Image: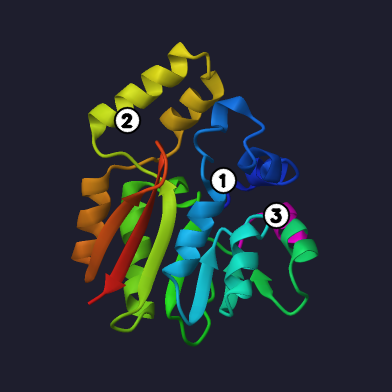
Amino acid sequence: MGTEFNELFDEWAHTYDSFVQGEDIQYKEVFAHYEEILEDVVNKSFGNVLEFGVGTGNLTNRLLAAGYNVYGIEPSQEMRAIAKQKLPQDVSIIEGDFLNFVAPSHVDTIVSTYAFHHLTDEEKNVAIAKYSQLLNKGGKIVFADTIFVDQEAYDKTVESAQEQGFHQLANDLQTEYYTRIPVMQSIFENNSFQVTFTRMNHFVWVMEATKQ
């Protein structure tokens, strides 16, 4: 993932918060239990937190409220601008993405919500390998994102979206890189993590991976 999604992010920045509130019927289920999803990620985090895809700062705010030190990475200039308006001035949010970033000197938890699907499975593996090098034993990756149990679950979800006339959602599911749980489990385990998956709605699962 380089800068290919930046234009999309910049366009989405000013309407993102309305999406997460369920105002777009096509994405209402994607963002169902949004506040609980953020809270679950926060509750599974600890220490110095590296956040990828800060977006408009919703998760960042919760992490700060929980007392964590947060170092944010966000590729979109527009998203960074909105986040900085919502967050304390001393919060660090710098340009970067899952693969290209400058890390702080010590990281305990790496978090992200609704973003890891921008990477292909090959890129996901490269990213997790990088994070494995950053984290000490007991360090965590806590990601919330749309993933699927298997190919059948994915196919049925696309079919359902098309039947409901949710063509934007169906196109999104077919053009982004939404992966399968067995793929993610292998990626984590091959990079020295033990991982669990918790379903939060039809689309989103929280992945909690602990460095071994």
Is residue 158 depicted above or below 117 in this figure? above
In percent of width and height, residue 125 lies at 31, 58
Is residue 10 depicted above or below 127 in this figure? above
Quarter of the figure with the C terminus: bottom left
The type of residue carrying mark 2 is Tyr
Mark on residue 154? 2
Q: Mark 1 — residue? A: 4
What secondary structure is found at the residue carrying circle 2? helix
Q: Is residue 4 left or right of 107 when viewed as pictured?
A: right
Q: Is residue 78 magenta?
A: yes
At x 42%, y 28%, the residue is: 174
- Between residues 150 and 5, which one lies in front from this camera angle? 150
In percent of width and height, residue 34 lies at 54, 48
In front: label 1 or label 2: 2
Quadrant hosting residue 95? bottom right
Q: CA distance from mark 1 to mark 3?
A: 15 Å
Among numbered discs 1 and 2, the one appearing first in the sequence: 1
- Can you name the residue that lies furthest to the bottom here? 105
Q: Mark 3 — residue? A: 79
Q: Which residues are magenta?
A: 73-81
At x 37%, y 46%, the residue is: 120
In front: label 2 or label 3: 2
Q: Is residue 204 left or right of 93 when viewed as pictured?
A: left
Question: Which class describes the residues within 10 Å of circle 2: few (<14), some (14-19), or many (20+)?
Answer: some
Among numbered discs 1 and 3, the one appearing first in the sequence: 1
In percent of width and height, residue 207 lies at 35, 57
